[in-house]
Amino acid sequence: MNAVESLKYFIPELILLGGAFAALTLDFFTKQKKLVGEFSLLVIVLVLGLIKTPAQPLPLFFGLFHLDAFAHFFRYLALGAVGVTILISLGYSPLEKRYAGEFYGLFLFMAFALILVAAANNLLMIFLAIEFVSLLSYLLVGFLKNDPKSKEAAVKYLLFGSVCSGIMLYGMSLLYGTSGSLELLVVGNALFYAPFKPLAITAILFFFAGLGFKISMAPFHMWTPDVYEGAPTPVTAFLSVAPKALGFAVFTRVLATAFGHLTDVWSPVLVILSILTMTIGNITAVSQSNIKRFLAYSSIAQAGYILMGLAVFSLLGRDAVLIYLLVYLLTNLGAFTVVLFVEGETQSNSLDAYAGLSQRSPIAAAMFTVFLLSLAGLPPLAGFIGKYYVFAAAIGGKFVMLAIFAAVNSVIAAYYYFRIIRLMYLAPATGPAFLSPSKTLTAALWVLFLSVLALGIFPGFFITRILG
């Protein structure tokens, strides 16, 4: 489909892009920067109302993008993550009023970039879309330019990300040199022949390095705790879910389209990386004393569980990845929203700030407990549904050893999640009762809290809509 014909299917994205420029323009004409945030939120809601499930896969812009049910799922995921992040950012006090408008505008650009990542079906477009997301991420991480930790986190993120992007680009160049094309399907057909198998294996490993950085996969996870700790808390919440989810989207599309006939090569590698990722994340999380670093290592472990679905690479495995990503987005955003609230009240991200939280803010403590138990995968919460599907995929694919390692890691994870719950309910309070959270923070908390409960209690209703 040519560019002109493609535009009518790209109207929501064009509105999103126009809204991003409009937000930056509005920033020049208003001193009430909160209006820019509210405008950005309205743009997200408008775009969510306009997007429609395609009746059949559509190759847009000469096949550079592929709009199918898979990409459509991630459109909703990206827009939802950005919308919630903007909502919780509206009351974030460290944002300087002078620059807050730019902050919201960047998030609209981020939503547009994430949608491009989900739909990209061409090596060049995949790289450009991922780099678009990366550049915006570097800016958002270092947005608090007077905060030394924020600046340090942005530099570390930039340096590590640049190296991993270069490695991935080199792998893409090998694929292009072999196949003479940037189209994933053509690349996959070219690599089907035996003489190109060693080159394909090398290219796969380079892809794993580049995308492994995005999803916090071991051994490319080292940036995660430092960046999560130094970034503004709403940005940390966002980075822990949205770019990671879209990294898995690219992973899935590339493996299915270009390397689908080489599962015997990359599946065992993913099994090892899955075990390594969840084990490093869970074991290291036990010793953390900063809540943002704690959740950073938790997110690394969660990436290991999601990798189980990719390693199996069956239809159930793919479905498990999609379900787990939705569950993880709702749960982790909810956990970070509570962190944002506690941080605003105590000016601290130490675990000690959560001592006696049940006395200082009973509702926040109850919600945080639900989010932590969901991350641990306990019923009847959404996290249990995600864990159930990845375990079912592993056992159904006869990856029994992978399932055993995942079960052991789940026990370790339960220990450190319950450690926070014990602190909130059994340790004495360290200060007076908290004030009520802002209206926007309250709205975000209740939406995420009820979503985690609803998805756990009525999974069938949601799963049939997720999987079509």
Image: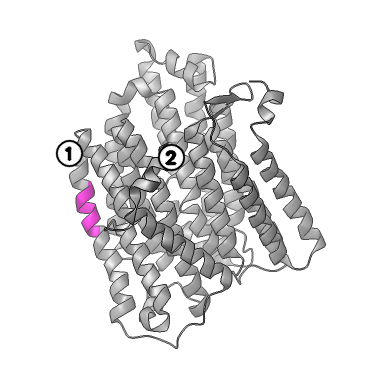
Res 61 quadrant in image: top right
| Most frequent secondary structure within the magenta stretch | helix
- Residues at circles 2 and 1 in contact by the CB criterion of under 8 Å: no
Question: Which quadrant of the rendered structure holds the N terminus?
Answer: top right
Look at the image and tell me whether residue 103 can be seen. yes
Note whether 437 is above or below 380 in the view shown. Answer: below
Classify mark 1: residues with Cα within 10 Å, few (<14), some (14-19) or many (20+). few
Q: Which residue is pictured at 65% across the width and 58% down the height? A: 103
Residue 111 coordinates in the image, percent (x, y): 59, 46
Which portion, as a residue range, is magenta?
406-412
Which structural element holds mark 1?
helix
Q: Is residue 15 left or right of residue 199?
A: right
Q: In this figure, which residue is indicated by the disc labeled 2?
A: 248
175 or 379: which is nearer to us?
Answer: 379
Q: Amino acid at mark 1?
A: Val
Residue 411 in the magenta stretch? The answer is: yes
The dot on residue 174 is none
Q: Which residue is mark 1?
A: 400
Residue 357 on the magenta segment: no
The type of residue carrying mark 2 is Phe
Which residue is painted at 46% across and 54% down in the image?
240
The picture places residue 44, in percent across and down from the top left corner, at 62, 51
